[in-house]
Image (cartoon, rainbow, N blue to C red):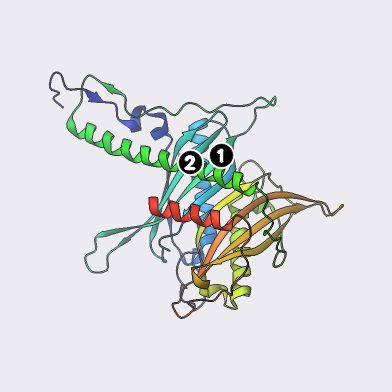
Amino acid sequence: MKVQKGVKRVVLPHLDDAGERSVVRMFEPVTAALTVGGTGPHSGTMDVQPLLKLMDIGSCACAEKFTGVQCVTASMGDVVFEYFPVAGELLELTARPVLVGRTSLEIALVVVSQSLGPQTGSLVRRDVCEAFFTYVTTRGPDGEKRFCPQLESSTSVSDNGDSDDQLRLSMMGEEHQWERLLAKFRKSLVKIETKKLLQPKSTTTTKAHDFEMSEVVLPAHQNHMGHTFGGVVMSWMAKAALTSASRKARLSTGDLRIGAVLRVNFATGSDVSDHLIFRPRINAVFDDGATAEVEVTVTKRNIATGKEVDINTGYFYVHPISKNHTRPFPATEATQGSAWRRRHLEARRQLL
């Protein structure tokens, strides 16, 4: 390639930028085993539960590729499902680091589906969802903290280059800046929400959970570090949320769909043979009864003593699929914080 004198050459991000080198891409064909069965309105579309597992695997691979050490999931959130793939389509998951602290980092993950148009045969790409995962590095063999490398800027240049490279870098740089802006915005909203929740209100009422659901961690549920795979726990939480919404709306789970997941926090982990207890409850109903916020808390129970330890908490937004069920959820008194979480979710949707 001939290079004119005086033209600066851009260093390609995929060659020299640490963040771009840590990008992880995964491809997964949507098979019948991953879709919802039965004859419901969304039978044949991909289930949320296996999708959450794939998202956790891809984001974890990205975090460990960037840091060079094993990482554990601290939280996942800001997931808005825009499209549910059908059997025969191909999923593409792309994860990259966008914010890095001393021992923690934020991973932005994008999921799109690919299919061939029935008429033209051209490739059709649809946005499925985006999400942010927070990971923490594990300690070393002697208990020492292991720190994350710095996230290098993708704006470095050298003396030679062409306009195509500069354009490509400019486009990728804008995309990365937008992702980092969203990550910072998400952190600020979480801090505001946490501060707001610490302020006591006399009108706040404590709701009991709807029911208890138990799961036993089996060897097949382990991750590569020998602990319970976070994606499995999130899929169980999604099942508990759908079940709670189904009982409240008096509809089958096949008539309902999880439209968004605001946040899932992991306080601690679990291991094989642990008994996990899932307690869902409907915190609030929005959109004139069309959407319910379901909070799911998870604990692990010691079968010998009966004592429980908190593992995580998540917030799921469930709505009916069919237009025939416009207001399936009866009105309920909102719990403290539900309005703030709803605003967080709406702000995220507007940014996207």
On the image, numbered disc 1 is attached to which residue? 135
**Figure quadrant of residue 135:** top right
Residue 191 vs 351, above or below: the answer is: above
**Figure quadrant of residue 4:** top left
The answer to whether the residue labelled 2 contacts the one labelled 1, judged by CB atoms less than 8 Å apart, is: yes
Residue 137 vs 51, above or below: the answer is: above
- Looking at the image, residue 93 sits to the left or right of residue 223; the answer is left
- Give coordinates of residue 15: x percent, y percent: 34, 29
Q: Tell me the CA gap for discs 2 and 1.
A: 8 Å
- Give coordinates of residue 216: x percent, y percent: 72, 57
Q: Secondary structure at mark 1?
A: strand
On the image, numbered disc 2 is attached to which residue? 107
**Figure quadrant of residue 215:** bottom right
Residue 37 visible to an observer of this rendering: no
Q: Secondary structure at mark 2?
A: strand
Mark 2 vs mark 1: which is more N-terminal? 2
- Label 2 CA crowd tier, 10 Å (few <14, some 14–19, many 20+): many
Please report the residue visible at 59 percent of the width from the left and 51 percent of the height from the top: 264
Please report the residue visible at 82 percent of the width from the left and 52 percent of the height from the top: 307
Q: Residue furthest bottom?
A: 324
Please report the residue visible at 59 percent of the width from the left and 36 percent of the height from the top: 136
- Looking at the image, residue 267 sits to the left or right of residue 65; the answer is right
- Looking at the image, residue 2 sits to the left or right of residue 315; the answer is left
